[in-house]
Amino acid sequence: MDAAEFDPLLQRAHALADAYLRGLGERHVGPRAGRDALRAALDVPLSSCGDDPAAVLDLLAAQAERGMSACGSPRYFGFVIGGAFPVALASDWLVSTWDQNAGIHAISPFASAVEEIAAEWLLDLFDLPRASGVGFVTGCQMASFTCLAAARHAVLRRAGWDVEADGLHGAPRINVVLSAEAHVTIDVALRYLGLGTRHVHRVDTDDQGRMRAEHLRDVLASLQGPTIVCAQGGNVNTGAFDPLRTIGELCNAHGAWLHVDGAFGLWVRASPRHAALADGIDLADSWATDAHKWLNVPYDCGVAIVRHADDHRRAMTSAAAYLIQTAGPERDAVDWAPEFSRRARGIPVYATLRALGRNGIAGLVDRCCDRARQMAALLATEDGVRVLNDVAINQVLVRFGDDDETTRAVVAGVQADGTCWLSGTTWHGLAAMRISVSNWATSEEDAQRSVDAIMRLYREVRTP
Ligand SMILES: Cc1ncc(COP(=O)(O)O)c(C=O)c1O
């Protein structure tokens, strides 16, 4: 192999990445080209002899520029999407370069050791039981799937059933309890696990989307047998936390497995200013979170954490004669995640945690929350603009003119304008604009500039 063959392409890729990153702060934040335009530029019959690789890179970069959202922009407030810290991006480049299959220790003792340490740091940062199992997965969807697979294993094992061997045919029925505001990915995980969604018990929520603990108490009192409860730390719309201490105590008293979806909310545990919001979260049995959201590592990286490491391992592990699996303390990632072969996505987590340190991570969380409060306060000064949620962390819901049509028109106007990007939602029957501040680089000026654009578009919509 001639290593020099890589040089021109990697240098080209570096130049293209550099140009993209330099433009990120000022470019139109949303995508400007859709499917038809992109297909017209990219779709050719697959050639027999191939094309010049450098030209392929140039073509992709040119079309990416108009066909992508600038998710790393400090004024990207859509969904809950983090940017990428420089050290996270740089280490992720190395992950691609090293191209490790991080599935088993025998292939990559390095990836295995780095992920083992990153996992320990996360448990320490979140102050969760240090003996928990930790799996690095593609995102919070798969983290909840992993945790709930461990839950399914554990509650059935306690009922004398081996779900890994016997499946769900004839198994004791598992009660599943969710709040009315559970994230859709919990429903999807239940579908994947054969538990389904039709028979789930839904607990009422309050005006911020928090589970009503007194209703949970009643629901649990009516149930017998294996039970799994899913709570959340960080509602996808309001950012609100379920009353986790009370929920944890109820679940422990009932012998129910408590899973917490903390896709972004779990990170408040790293902030002395915000940690109290997640008080009692450590009473749970499993936790799902994302590093690609609030830790600002590149996609994709979710984290599944299970208090009972044995249950986690039994639900996930795979073994085959040709594999070389460790019997020692070394970590085989296949024991902790649904994936078999996989990218060493824990490496950027290690790099980012190490480069930021505790204070850096607390600062990241606090900064995003402060920018969200700044935007909420500025928006609320305008006549006819109402902030619908208590801005406890990084999520803001805004309604314009107390009218669905006006609100949707402002959201569409902001998206087309390109100063910032955000999307809409429906909150308790009302259309709302959704702002999620999840990027390490969002400054006070970015927040102000975005609010100015939102106000300008609202005034345009109000006075056509
Ligand atoms: C509360 C919550 N749970 C789960 C998810 C799903 O995460 P992912 O897209 O990483 O699978 C999200 C995504 O926004 C979320 O906000």
Image (cartoon, rainbow, N blue to C red):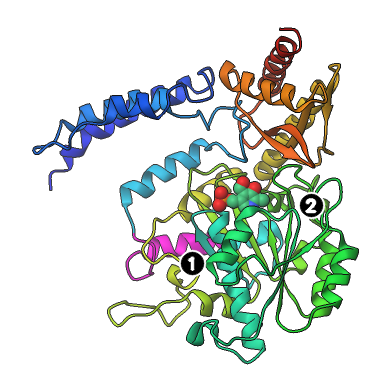
In the rendered image, which residue does mark 1 sit on? 337
In the rendered image, which residue does mark 2 sit on? 241
Whole-angstrom CA distance, mark 1 to mark 2, is 26 Å
Residue 263 can be seen in this image:
no
Q: Is residue 139 magenta?
A: no
Residue type marked 1: Ala
Q: Locate residue 423, reporting x and y percent.
A: 63, 31
Residue type marked 2: Phe
Residue 429 can be seen in this image:
yes
Q: Is 98 in front, or is 209?
A: 209
The relative height of residue 2 versus residue 323 in the rendered view (above or below) is above
Name the residue located 38 percent from the left edge and 49 percent from the top edge: 95
- Rate crowding at label 1 as few (under 14), some (14 to 19) or many (20 or more) other CA atoms within 10 Å: many
Residue 235 left/right relative to 165: right
The relative height of residue 31 versus residue 279 in the rendered view (above or below) is above
Residue 297 left/right relative to 221: left
Q: Is mark 1 within 8 Å of ligand 1?
A: no
The reply to whether discs 1 and 2 touch (Cβ–Cβ < 8 Å) is: no
Q: Is 160 in front, or is 176?
A: 176
The furthest residue to the left: 49
Total number of numbered labels? 2
Q: Which residues are magenta?
A: 101-119
- Rate crowding at label 2 as few (under 14), some (14 to 19) or many (20 or more) other CA atoms within 10 Å: many
Helix or strand or loop: what does disc 2 sit on? loop
Name the residue located 81 percent from the left edge and 41 percent from the top edge: 392
